[in-house]
Image: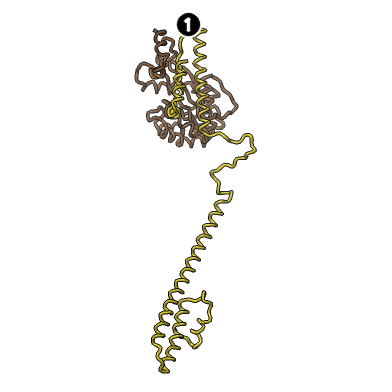
Chain colours: A yellow, B brown
Amino acid sequence: MEFGEESSPALAFEKNAFELTVEDVYDISYVIGRDLLKISSTGEEVSDLQFRIVRVLEMFETLVNKYNLSVEELKMERDNLKAELDRIIKEGSPSSGHANQVVVDLNDPNRPRFTMQELKEVLQERNQLKAQLMVAQEEIQLYKSGILPQPEPAMADVDLDTPAAKEDSSSTINEKTTIGKL
Amino acid sequence: MAKKTYDLLFKLLLIGDSGVGKTCVLFRFSDDAFNTTFISTIGIDFKIKTVELQGKKIKLQIWDTAGQERFHTITTSYYRGAMGIMLVYDITNAKSFENISKWLRNIDEHANEDVERMLLGNKCDMEDKRIVPKAKGEQIAREHGIRFFETSAKANINIEKAFLTLAEDILRKTPVKEPNSENVDITNGGGVTGWKSKCCS
């Protein structure tokens, strides 16, 4: 790098410490090196000092470099988080965010409040009772027509088994047995 | 059991879009009646009708399913036990026809592999509102190797024929055996058994 004016590299000394770049550190090294050269040309022994100053400048370079990288990383992280936040806010808007959810009005007396499983069980019971009623009706018909002379145990001949019913606990099976005995 | 009122029990299932007339088809067959008011079936219902085929009394237990998607989990659990399935669409409703493939997939997924299938194009009395040509129904049935009827629950067209044909198809592949021994098995282990055999012997 060519500096037209002698003062240009020296400007780095006037900068805010947090705004220093690695280039500024090189400028500072240049200026200090030049000053050391002036002193040594007067014949004074400065090699030890020179060595230490170089060492401090190296440390300085590392620190500035690291600081700038950290700032850059944090900026990227911040931008990522901002983008993420925007996305979540957009998705959370009522128009699109709850597409698969139903809003239930708790004041609506007709609101849904039973589960599919409960409905399934009620329907199964309804159909079982219906089957029993049919069996009973059939039997009454037989009595009326005189085909059955005397009471006799009847079979529930409507098998209402569904896969779900078979999975049920033994209580259901017991119930079925009872139906069979009726 | 001398008083047994039937020789065989066949379980049938009606499926198809909501509003195509499954319940009306069944009501026409079981009660020979028709009702114009539309009441959506809740989940699953059934009716019983005993018919006579080849000298055998066959009790048909016909399950009527809700076509609405929200009952899907309930209705599909009844596919497994079905020996025959009637897939109903509405000839005045294109969507119900398009959904046939969806219903056939449901059968493949949930029913027994050897279940007897049948396609019904219902409401064939409404010729002025027809959208699905009869030929299209015949074509899709042919593609899937299943029987097809156009029916009208309202005008009582082909309803009994459809059910009896399906029952005959099931009867044809039913092995000859002592009927319903498995139903009797239900009472096994019960204290009543001894008493019953004494009384019935």
Front-most of residues B32 and B148? B32
Percent of width and height locating residue B73: 48, 34
Q: Is residue B100 in view from this perspective?
A: yes
Q: Is residue B165 left or right of residue B21?
A: left
Front-most of residues B28 and B178? B178
Above or below, comparing residue A135 to residue B94 in the picture: above
Which residue is found at the position 43% from the left and 79% from the top? A56
Front-most of residues A31 and B105? A31
As helix, strand or loop, the secondary structure at mark 1 comes to: loop
Above or below, comparing residue B104 to residue A46 in the picture: above
Which residue is found at the position 42% from the left and 94% from the top? A42
Chain bearing tag 1 is A
Most extreme residue toward the right is A107
Most extreme residue toward the bottom is A42
The amino acid marked with disc number 1 is: Gln
Give the crowd class for mark 1: few <14, some 14-19, many >=20 residues within 10 Å.
few
Q: Is residue B118 in view from this perspective?
A: no
Front-most of residues A80 and B95? A80
Which residue is found at the position 42% from the left and 90% from the top? A37
Percent of width and height locating residue B198: 40, 8
Name the residue that disc number 1 marks.
A150
Percent of width and height locating residue B89: 50, 31
Location of residue B110 (image quadrant): top left
How many marks can you see? 1
Percent of width and height locating residue A105: 62, 40
Quadrant in the picture for the N terminus of chain A? bottom left
Which residue is found at the position 46% from the left and 25% from the top? A171
